[in-house]
Amino acid sequence: MSPLAAWARFAARRPWRVLAVALAVLVGLGALYVLFGGRYGGSFSLPGTESQRLFDLLEEHFPGTAGDSATVVVRAPAGFDDPEVRTRAEELVADLKDLPEVIGVSSPYEQPGAISRDGSIARISVQYGKESFGLEETSVDALLDLRERRSSPGFQVEAGGQVVSAAEQEAPGSSELIGVGAAVVILLIAFGSIVAMALPITTALLALTSGFFLVGVGASFVDLPSFTPQFASMIGIGVGIDYSLLVVTRFREGVALGSSVVDAIGQAAATAGRSVVFAGFTVVIALLGLWAVGIPFISYVGSAAALVVALAVTVAILVLPAIVGLVGGHIDRWRIPGLAAPAHESETGFGYRLGRLIQRAPLLFFALSLAALVVLAWPVLSIRLGSSDDGSNPKSFTSRRAYDLLSEAFGPGLNGPILIGVRTDDVVGDAAAMRLPLIVGQTEGVVSVTPARFNEARTMATIIVIPETAPQAEETDALVNRLRRIVSLATEGTSAEALVGGSTALFIDVDSKIASRMPLFFAAVIGLSFVLLMATFRSVLVPLKAAIMNVLSIGASYGVIVAVFQWGWLGEYLGVERGPIESFLPMMLFAVLFGLSMDYEVFLVSRIQEEYLKSRDNSEAVARGLSVTTRVISAAAAIMVAVFLSFAVSDQRVIKEFGIGLAAAIFLDATLVRLILVPSIMQLMGNANWWFPQWLDRLVPRFGLHEPQPEGAAGS
């Protein structure tokens, strides 16, 4: 008897003990969160890049400018020469200077070019001494409260910049509730029973709550981005419900076939439980593989999601058997009229008929489904990575309204100034720094350049460049690259070290770093998954097929993201503005999706393998394996799609991208890939599916999902 089956039988016989321990652990984690829970959001570091080098130098030589800033924008149709408007503007500046953690405020009347040509719009720069995520929450709230108090008809006040953008990130809540609500409906349709529906929901929420507590504690020790809770919740709800769904489905099947409650739980743990452990392990490994990227915030987010997935697996195999043991034979009670679902599919089920239909023309189904995936993936060839700016925010955000006012009055480039820093050691270096504004000002795409501003020790100077185009425009990316070449040549042969930074330059560096690590990361994740599947199924072609199919479905999801977020398809209905795809998104999506797609691969192929070990008939095994998994795979995928799409209502663009990308990939994976493409390929390959050379069998360890078959059992 496997350890999983032994534990499941123990938990079913002593459910109250197991549940008491689980509750005590949950309470303990909650206490840790209350005592040590931290704030989300932190410094964005990018070791080994020019942008990070410039930031480090600014912290050393210009500590004031190393902090983030806010830009307060005021529209006054009467004009800023109007005495009443001037009085209100000066009062606003005075109030801004009194805000906590503000170290400097520039009045529009003292800063050249801070008032638009028509005199109706002015900007006020508010400098903080820390980065936005290091500020106290009350300090940012004070700025937003002041903006609201001072704004009135004839004197519109808006606020933008890094400080405000960080504060506008929404907290977890509504999207999660929508996702759980959709999952409840789908589970009711899948099971037809309120009791059966409640089991996956309960265990998923238990795992998610535990994960939320632990990730919150982790936020005290590392800088977790503000979207971490939503991202972890999105993954946690989906896999938490899916993993429990697989175990509950197998338990219902066992009870329907006449097994006792304890035996059915043990069998479910030995089969579906092993599939859950394997699938969850694959997801965790893929997410932890993000450490190979070398970008801390990506690594931290991946680790947070991996922790939530690991907890979902833990609850599904340790706690769920105890809950099922309490419910026992009453799992199908409280049925919903008209939704009575069979606990065990037969040869009359939809899945079996679908399998037989595909087997009549496997090449045709293979070609059609493959062509559909290729067409959907086609847009990825024109993907443009970058970083969306405040211009992609909803118009309900003050940062978006400030962005629009600045673009209207001063041009879009003012929303993304480029920073040049020059480190000098002598008079020659100082002279090179002072010459740079003249040289940079002649560069195509530059609107204006400030004179070099030195620190008191004259060891470093800063120059601010205003581009013609918006921060997320391709032309701005090209300008940053041109400036890097120009300032390097201009300071060559001197003691000066000139660096180009700012948010636009930072994400160019992110793109470059990701591009250099992506092939290695993809190869590592695919290679490890191939080895694990090979060790599990004792086959060469099954894992090879799985790796190729997963890459195709992920490519198709990338294509959907490009069409929606970059090309603007359906953007009007989804509340999406056209812009680049977040540079870190493809790699994070790959890690998540490659792991999640293994769930369905393992569950489907393990059932096909079970049937093959009984009959040694590949065609019958494919049809019967599809028969007993179609309903659960469809339900599991529908739940994940619903959960992920619920996050598309988020105001945060990056969460929308994750939600729509994940939903598209899971839908395609569970329909085109698992239910059509995989069966057609396995039918075409025949018994070769299970070919495994003896020399390889001796080298590869065994991670079988099934109990060892007695001699001759396969043919009996």
Image (spheres, helix red, strand yellow):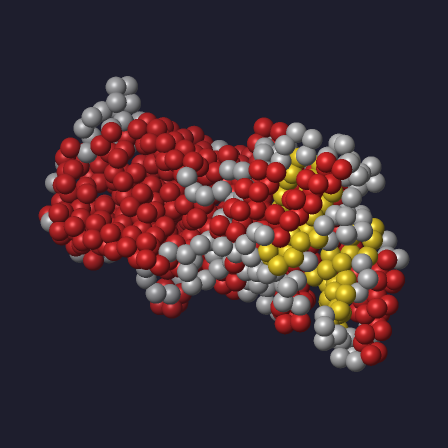
- Is residue 471 visible to the viewer in this orientation of the structure? no
Q: Is residue 690 above or below residue 49?
A: above
Residue 409 position by quadrant: top right
Quarter holding the N terminus?
Answer: bottom left
Of residues 76 and 409, the one nearer the viewer is 76
Q: Position of 436 compared to 166: left or right?
A: right
Q: Nearer the viewer, residue 545 or 434?
A: 434
Q: Is residue 326 visible?
A: yes
Position of residue 95 measured from the top left corner of the image (x, y, whole percent): 61, 47
The residue located at (41%, 45%) in the rendering is: 233
Q: Is residue 399 left or right of residue 222?
A: right
- Horizontally, residue 165 falls left or right of residue 336, namely right
Choose top left, top right, bottom left or bottom right for residue 203: top left
Q: Residue at x 66, y 35 (%)?
A: 156
Q: Please identify the residue farthest to the top as the structure is shown.
A: 338
**Relative depth, front residue between 417 and 554:** 417
The picture places residue 270, in percent across and down from the top left corner, at 23, 51
Where residue 599 appears, as percent x and y from the top left, is 39, 47
Image location (x, y in percent) of residue 526: 49, 57
Image vertical order of residue 407 relative to residue 51, above or below: above
How many labels, in total?
Answer: 0
Residue at image point 82% right, 79% down: 427
The correct choice, above or below, for 495 with respect to 548 in the image is below
Which residue is pictured at 57% across the width and 60% down the height? Answer: 130
Tell which of 348 and 180 is nearer to you: 180
